[in-house]
Image (cartoon, rainbow, N blue to C red):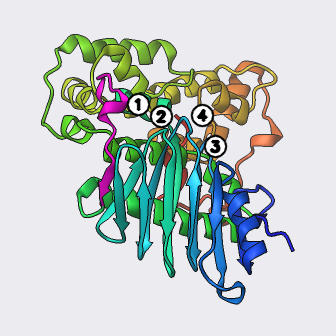
Amino acid sequence: MRAHLVPTDPAGSLLRCHARGHEAVHDALAAAYPNAKEFALPHSDSETQFFCTQVRLSNISLYRNATSGYSCHANPTDAVRITLPAHGSVVVASKRTSLVAVAGHVGSVCLTELVERKVPSNYMGFHFQVSKRELLSRAHLLTGREYTTDDVATSIGLRTPEGAILYRGVANLFLEVEHLAAIGLGQLARTGINDLIQNLSAVAVVRGVREHLTQGRQYLGDNHAESARQFIDAHAAEPIRISELAAQLGVSCRALQLAFRKRFGCTPLEHLFACRLGLARARLLAPTNMSTVAAVAVDCGFVNLGAFAGRYYRAFGERPSETLKRGLLRAFGRRDSRYHPHPNPLQRGDINLGLPTRSEHSDW
């Protein structure tokens, strides 16, 4: 019987496979690692097993494997291959280096060359690939510096701060996605997490990135912060990534945030949200006959309507629907039945319990 990764939720964000026996395990390994070949299974048919869970993000797939053991050759690729052992060890050999990746101590990083993997019994670990171009681009966005493949390390110290954070981030990601998939919300894993994994990988794998980010405050003149503010003011309703804005100014994201806060008393992201909220309020107070809260929010750069409503209420002390109701009354001399507030706050369903939301920073 052939074994394949099977989706566990409608979005296909979480897939699982449990294979037993030589034929099924060989098929499962080939499906999980289509770039690999020459799989060898050292144990008897009845002792051979392979468990695999895959998380699909927007442009990264991560794997959590447990196995009775195998070896293979992975063909050259344009990606950086990262192995983070959780239990046991794995031998990863390439033209550049031969490394024993050991749980709790060291993970392996392989570039584009042919790789030989020897995985012993009772191994469990996490594996994923990041495009070499994307990894170096991330490092550039974080620091404003140019990097090459010579700057990519061959191992990750799992006891270093950056290595430990990368490992915990990947391990916790699987737990979170499994919980989301169990309640039918696996598609939420595709938003935001992808950037986090790529940024953590750049810090842990590309030499010099962490040192650059933690070397202390980089001095920026007021003109850098002012240029950032003017750009945000002019393009607030458009998609803006602060890391890309920092790169355009030729500085690191951290340095821009520090300079911006020193000059204006807030971060660039906080200023961006304030600008978007101001735009939204102005449009709600001067609506057209077809204006809706959702349309105004999207036009002003918000993609998460729940986060928009919460931010709006905290900023202005009223719900956006109440502002729109006043705007319609003033502009057209009528009330709109869509926006009549319910007199009972319990029935309105807008009691603020003070709980943080995961989507609070997802709409920039």
Could you say which is closer to the camera, residue 36 or residue 363?
Answer: 36
Q: Is residue 328 magenta?
A: no
**Marks 2 and 1, Cα distance to the nearest angstrom?**
6 Å
Could you say which is closer to the camera, residue 14 or residue 114?
Answer: 114
Mark whose residue sits in front, 2 or 4: 2
Q: Are marks 3 and 4 in contact (CB under 8 Å)?
A: no
Region rendered in magenta: 142-157
Q: Are marks 4 and 1 in contact (CB under 8 Å)?
A: no
Mark whose residue sits in front, 3 or 2: 2
Q: Which residue is mark 2?
A: 132
Residue 183 seen in render: no
Query: In the rendered view, would you say 159 is above or below 69?
Result: above
Q: Are marks 2 and 1 in contact (CB under 8 Å)?
A: yes
Residue 41 location, x and y as percent?
Answer: 63, 73
Q: Which residue is mark 4?
A: 302
Q: In the structure shown, which secondary structural element does the residue marked by tag 2 occupy? A: helix
Q: In the structure shown, which secondary structural element does the residue marked by tag 1 occupy? A: helix
